[in-house]
Amino acid sequence: MWTFLAPFASSKLFYQRAGVYAPWLGWFALLLLVMGCVWGLVFAPADYQQGEAFRMLYVHVPTAFLSMTLYATMGALSLSLLVWRIKLAGVLLAAIAPVGASMALLALITGSLWGKPMWGAWWIWDARLTSELVLLLLYLAILVTQHAYAHNKEQGDKLVAMLSLVGLIDLPIIHYSVDWWNTLHQGSSLSVFSKPSIEASMLYPLLIMLIGFTLFSGFIILSKARVMILKRERRQQWVRKLVEGL
Amino acid sequence: MTHALLVWFDMGGYAAYIWPAYGAVFSVLIAHVFYTKAEQKRTLRTLRRWMEASS
């Protein structure tokens, strides 16, 4: 257990471990994304209702999923920063926010490009769409806060953590919005607790894309976190050695 | 062959929605990779200069 947790207590260890894992995540992500795209765009059969337009699923669902999963991760990190004062959690918060924000933005863009041909509108003020927009705004608020506290990162981390915790309330709202309100948005294709409502030939490329996007996010987050650690720990001996040795 | 390719590219008439969506998604992902790499290089350069000045 301790060997697994140790990198989270020591920035140096985290920097080294992340440097080992990040390239693997990156290459696997590339492999899976290429596989998922070819499978989803070429081999998966067209939908009986939506025709070829359903292929939007393979970019829309992973981006929307990650916009929420990354936010939930930020919630957990915020707790460990505020309660256990794990400094590294602050670094990871800062590394995740830009990735999560792009995923939320992409989910809205792909959703809009899917909504136009299916519903006849680019945008409607419906529960699912509005709550996802709120998520994007939360991410933007976090990014602005980080930027404003660039010269007092410890204080900035704490504010970001509190902001993320307050924003957590939006996650269940997004998730259940399609059940709680009448909405144009279709129900979930996947669920942890029940059989997926999607055919296997369409499901496998979706799963591959989901894993691919997740690994990709991990790759970017670890790479960003490493750069941030170097900046923040610049006064440490090991950073000096590392930078001067390059 | 070319015909089949064109049919595929047309995406059943939804080409104008599918391709911009995939284009947007993958441009952002690629931008992240290059931005992060550039940031890494810039940071190392700045830190080296900072260390030379402070040592």
Image (cartoon, helix red, strand yellow):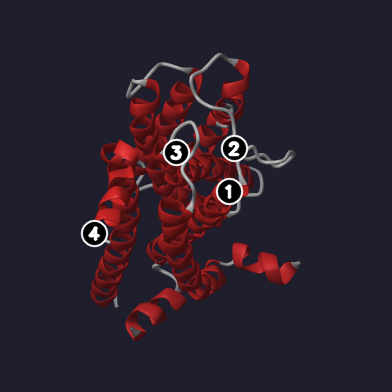
Say whether disc 3 or disc 1 marks the residue closer to the N-terminus. Answer: 3
Q: Closer to us: mark 2 or mark 4?
A: 4
Residue A150 pos. (x, y %): 34, 47
Query: Rounded to the nearest whole Å, what is the CA distance between mark 2 and mark 4?
Result: 34 Å
Q: Chain of mark 2?
A: A
Q: Nearer the viewer, residue A104 or A144?
A: A104
Query: Rounded to the nearest whole Å, what is the CA distance between mark 3 and mark 1?
Result: 12 Å
Residue B20 pos. (x, y %): 27, 43
Query: Rounded to the nearest whole Å, what is the CA distance between mark 3 and mark 2?
Result: 12 Å
Residue A140 in sight in this render:
yes
| Type of the residue with mark 1 | Leu
Q: Identify the image quadrant of residue A119.
A: top left
Report helix, strand or loop for mark 4. Answer: helix
Query: Rounded to the nearest whole Å, what is the CA distance between mark 1 and mark 4?
Result: 29 Å
Residue A229 in sight in this render:
no
Report helix, strand or loop for mark 2. Answer: loop
Residue A89 pos. (x, y %): 55, 52
Say whether disc 3 or disc 2 marks the residue closer to the N-terminus. Answer: 3
| Type of the residue with mark 4 | Thr
Q: Chain of mark 1?
A: A
Query: Rounded to the nearest whole Å, what is the CA distance between mark 3 and mark 4?
Result: 24 Å
**Residue B2, labelled with which disc?**
4
Crowd rating for badge 2 (residues with CA inside 10 Å; few <14, some 14–19, many 20+): some
Q: Chain of mark 4?
A: B
Q: Which residue is mark 2?
A: A189
Q: Which residue is mark 3?
A: A54
**Residue A203, labelled with which disc?**
1
